[in-house]
Image (spheres, coloured by chain):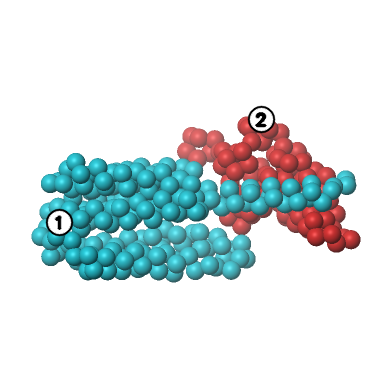
Amino acid sequence: MVLTKNEAAAALADIQETTRRGATLRGYRIGGPILMLWSVVWALGYLGMGLLPSHQWGWVWLVLDTIGAIGSILLARPADKATRAAGMKSQGNSLKMMGGMAVAIVFVMSTFYVLRPTDPAAYLAFPGLMVGAIYAAVGVFVAGRYLGIGAVMFALTLVGFYAFPEILAFWMASASVALFVSGVWLARA
Amino acid sequence: MAQADDLIHQPLRLKIMAALYAERDGEPPEFSRLKAITQATDGNLGSHLTALEKAGYVEILKDHVGKRPRTRAKVTADGAKAFRGHVAYLRELVEGID
């Protein structure tokens, strides 16, 4: 068999695209259960905000975020193991995940500290908007399905903020169902 | 110089081998997942998998999960070696190495 340089380049591009598509689907399968876990964290956190006085909100989220972070690392472990078993250098995904979460938490707290919102609804809506924006950005740059998930979270947060401000915490807690369904959607990819 | 592999070079077989090679140390992918990765139809994927299996490049694993039949595919050691050789050939060609 004799191939031209162009045919060889096209075949290599096909291999690269197939490998990328496989990695994206694998990523969805790992990300799905993690998203389901965070939907539970989200629901409990917002229920806490709806039921507890505001000075306790920070502690509620600190405990829940810690549980979520540990759970995410445990759920991502099979992927790290597979990476090592494949003889590839482990890219420290767990550390990256921890770093990403820490950045998000510090960003939210700093924003509240700087802007000092007087409307409690702003405290409830801002994390939802930020999570929606992060997922949408991941969707644009890495894996398309996250764009839809981010858009839904962003839209649900805005709908709750403008349409149901009195029950926003409970609205946000119920929006976690959308996150859970998104997790199932990813896990079945 | 590395040698081309006529059997692997067919476009869909190349995609199948690329997908299975990437998963060689993990859980063998199910037929439906392989279909999504390679964007092939059921019939096409089945016939090319059979061709690769006959060549000894792929192993087809059939079992049941509960009552649901499951078909998975796994690249063999010979298949992995042939794929690496073919990729090396393609690279040499692109880079202009004689």
The colour of chain B is red
Residue A66, image quadrant: bottom left
Can residue A115 be seen in this snapshot? yes
What x and y, as percent, mark residue B79? Answer: 74, 51
Can residue B82 be seen in this snapshot? no
Nearest the eye: B79 or B62: B79
**Tag count in the figure?**
2
Nearest the eye: A50 or B64: A50
**Which circle marks residue A119 in the picture?**
1
Residue A34 higher or lower than B35, as above or below: below
Residue type pointed to by label 1: Asp
What x and y, as percent, mark residue A116? Answer: 19, 65
Residue at 61% in and 38% down:
B39
**Which circle marks residue B43 in the picture?**
2
* Chain with cyan colouring: A
Q: Give the class, few, some or many, for how many residues have Cα within 10 Å of label 1's Cα (few <14, many ≥20).
A: few
In this rendering, which labeled residue sits more in front, label 2 or label 1? Answer: 1
Quick one: SS at disc 2? helix
Q: Quadrant of the C terminus of chain B?
A: bottom right
Residue type pointed to by label 2: Gly
Residue at 20% in and 58% down:
A123
Outermost residue toward the left?
Answer: A53
Residue A96, image quadrant: bottom left
On the rendered structure, is B96 left or right of A44? right
Measured in 3D between alpha carbons, the distance from the residue under mark 2 to the one under mark 1, in whole angstroms, is 60 Å
